[in-house]
Image: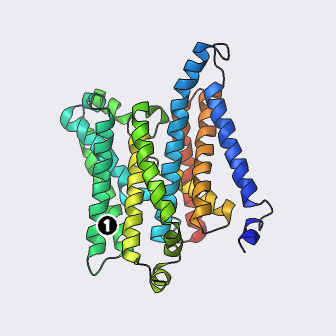
Amino acid sequence: MAEAVSVRRGIPVALRFAIVAGVVVIAAVLVMTWDIGPEPGSKGFWLIVRMRSVTVVTILLVAACQGIATVLFHTATGNRILTPSIMGFDALYVLIQTGTAFFLGAQALSATDGVPKVLVQSAVMVAFATLLYGWLFGGRRGSLHVTLLVGLVLGAGFGTLSSFMQRMLVPGDFDILSARLFGNISNSNAEYLPVGYGIVAVILVLVFLRRHRLDVLALGRDTATNLGLNHKREVITTLVMVAVLVSISTTMVGPMTFFGFIVATLAYQLTGSQEHRRVLPFAVLLGAAMLLGAYFILHHVFNAAGLVTVIIEFVGGLAFVILLLRKGSM
């Protein structure tokens, strides 16, 4: 049966996986070696390659976080239209950054940069998600739909509060803040990577160990419950893992609302499967291929690296609207 699914659309899934992996490798090599002034093999050449490798490693981390988080979020909610940003994670990040600039001054954003700040921001976002899920699912009326609605309302509230504080900032502070509120791969810092990869590695192990439970969870509440799964506990656990992944990605490069949606949607189409052991690796590779390819073209061809996430978010938002109109409902 699995083999029939894999060849249903002509090209075997394994070959598709190999093609996407090849694109990732080629794009990564091009990003690191294209148009380097020093002679290949020289000290200067390897110095530039090492500097560019930070961008490549950051992109791989962000692709893993966004791809896995979105697929897990779809599994927990049972809806492939929704994205983790609907829970207010991006709005909370913006609120943290804006609050820091408002109360401490925009210079504090740079002065406090470092691993401790990343850990604190991530801890705040994960604590927010854990408390929200525990509170909403803890009562008798615990409902996923209520959770999503509350997350949407909180996100709107965070956005309104952030807008109010931004209007109170002086122009100089607002300019500094604005540079941090858009997804930008250039915001990455090599100092953050070991921490980010360490946390994501733990999540990957947990996801691998729970892959069969996730497959059952994707079947829906009633089916999962009839098969002996504690649906409420599994949903909360999955959403907390989503919060961790989104917090790492957001603190690394800033908010990315629709990137994960594109990656997850393409992964479902290319695998033709519901199994997480197939969908998740595809989502990660597709995310890496898209980001690396877009970064190479915009940075080395058009000299507009800052537009990478802007264009991807625009395309993702457009795809989101088109899919929503085709489905006719959330």
In this rendering, position of residue 68 left or right of residue 127: right
| Residue visible at 33% across and 30% down in the picture | 176
Residue situated furthest right in the rendering: 10
Q: Within 10 Å of the Cα at label 1, are there few (<14), some (14-19), or many (20+) other Cα atoms? A: many
Asked if residue 282 can be seen in this view, the reply is yes
| Residue visible at 65% across and 32% down in the picture | 29
Q: Using the image, determine if residue 123 lies above or below residue 117.
A: below
| Residue visible at 24% across and 34% down in the picture | 169
Q: Using the image, determine if residue 198 lies above or below residue 192.
A: below
Colour scheme of the picture: rainbow
Q: Quadrant of residue 194?
A: top left
Q: Amino acid at mark 1?
A: Tyr
Residue bearing mark 1? 133
Residue 124 position, x and y percent, is 27, 50
Q: Using the image, determine if residue 173 lies above or below residue 146.
A: above
In this rendering, position of residue 195 left or right of residue 259: left
Q: Quadrant of the N terminus?
A: bottom right
Residue 237 position, x and y percent, is 38, 66
| Residue visible at 65% across and 42% down in the picture | 24
Q: Nearer the viewer, residue 43 or 81?
A: 43
